[in-house]
Amino acid sequence: GQNIDQPTEMTATEGAIVQINCTYQTSGFNGLFWYQQHAGEAPTFLSYNVLDGLEEKGRFSSFLSRSKGYSYLLLKELQMKDSASYLCAVRDLGGRGSTLGRLYFGRGTQLTVWP
Amino acid sequence: GAGVSQSPRYKVTKRGQDVALRCDPISGHVSLYWYRQALGQGPEFLTYFNYEAQQDKSGLPNDRFSAERPEGSISTLTIQRTEQRDSAMYRCASSSSAGEETQYFGPGTRLLVL
C-alpha cells in the first residue's frame, strides 16, 4: 500500500512564494504527481516527477527525492486564483504485466492566498 | 469529445436502489479510471480499464460495486443496493495510453443516498 502525507492547510499573501511538502511511503514507485483542485471542480494536472530533481513549469516547480520519499510543490508570485487544494499523488508499479499503476492521492493541502 | 464527461452530474436515490454512473472519456483515450472523493479528501482509486479490459478492481469497496467498459470507450460504474455510506463524489479520469503520465478528470457525479 501507500501512505501519503501533506499539510492540511496553508496560507500566504499575494506575490509571495509557498512550498507545499509531500512525504510518501510506498511498496512500489512509478512517479509522483501534483494536481490542483478548485472548490467544486475536477482536479487538473500540474506536474509529474519520476526522477530525482526539480521540474520547472512557469510559476510552478516540483521537486522529488526518491531516496527520502519526499516531494514539494513550489508556487511563485502567488495570485488570488491560486487559492485551491493541491493534491500529491503517487503511482505504483501496477501488476499483471501492466506498466500503468493506480494513483494514490493524499488528502490535499488547502492553500488560501490573501491580498 | 473535448473533455471527460460524466452523467448524471447529480443523483439522489433511496437506500436499497441501484444506480448507474456513466463516464465518457476523451476520444481515443485508452485508459479509464474511476475514483471516489469524499469532502476534504483526495480521490480514492476504485478501478481502471485499458481498452475494454478491467486491469485492477482492487479498490472497489465490496461486491455491490462493479464497472464495465464493453466497447473500450464509455464506462459504467454500477452500485447495487445503495447504502448511505456510498454518498460521495464519483470521478472518472482518462489518459491517452497505458503509462501516459497525465490523467484528465471529469466533473464528477455527486451521489446522495437517502
Image (cartoon, rainbow, N blue to C red):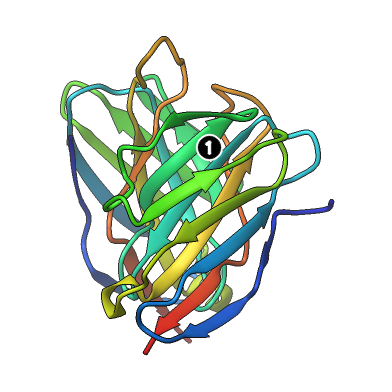
Q: Nearer the viewer, residue B13 or A105?
A: B13
Q: Is residue A25 left or right of residue B85?
A: left
Q: Amino acid at mark 1?
A: Glu
- Residue drawn 37% across the image and 90% down it: B114
Q: Name the spot of residue B36 as percent of width and height, x first.
A: 40, 60
Residue B34 position (above or below residue B18): above
Q: Name the spot of residue A38 as percent of width and height, x first.
A: 52, 72
Furthest residue in direction bottom, as rendered: B114
Q: Name the spot of residue B113 as percent of width and height, x first.
A: 39, 83
- Residue drawn 47% across the image and 43% down it: A61
Q: Residues within 10 Å of mark 1 (few under 14, many from 20)?
A: few
- Residue drawn 56% across the image and 67% down it: B108
Q: Is residue A1 left or right of residue B76?
A: left
- Residue drawn 84% across the image and 51% down it: B1
Furthest residue in direction right, as rendered: B1
Residue A91 position (above or below residue A7): above
